[in-house]
Amino acid sequence: QVQLVESGGGLVQPGGSLRLSCVASGSIFRIYAMGWYRQAPGKQREMVAVIGSGGTPNYADSVKGRFTISRDNAKNTVYLQMNRLKPEDTAVYYCNQAPSVSKSPGAYWGQGTQVTVSS
């Protein structure tokens, strides 16, 4: 059974930074693509960033240059470093595991972690 557990969310002022972490268990982590998605109130869930098994990242245009996705296969963990946060980044952030980048999102989701950007 695949389990994804996110952490690192919280309240931050505009312009600040947060780092989200997602620890995976129950699968061979290194062979899967991993992604971060977010859902703001009243909006559909959207892709933020995905990273393939080889480490190549893809980003939504809205976060390019501000967010960085990375993975540590030895720790079964994917990270999302978020810099220069904006109020419009406020959302619940979800971790996802997929067979590949082209088949993202996959079937497995974490429980989500709240990110609130506000002064």
Image (cartoon, helix red, strand yellow):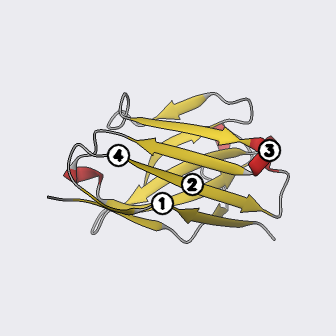
| Type of the residue with mark 1 | Gly
Residue where numbered disc 3 is placed: 74
At horizontal 54% and vertical 38% (from top left) the residue drawn is 69
Mark 4 neighbour class, 10 Å CA radius: few under 14, some 14 to 19, many 20 or more: some
Q: CA distance from mark 2 to mark 3?
A: 14 Å
Residue where numbered disc 1 is placed: 8
Mark 1 neighbour class, 10 Å CA radius: few under 14, some 14 to 19, many 20 or more: some
**Eyeballing the image, is 12 above or below 67?**
below
Q: Secondary structure at mark 4?
A: loop
Residue where numbered disc 4 is placed: 17
Circle on res. 21: 2
**Residue 49, percent across and down?**
50, 41
Q: Are marks 3 and 1 in contact (CB under 8 Å)?
A: no
| Type of the residue with mark 4 | Ser
**Residue 39, percent across and down?**
38, 61
Quarter in which the C terminus is drawn: bottom left
Q: Secondary structure at mark 3?
A: helix
In terms of image quadrants, where is residue 54? top right
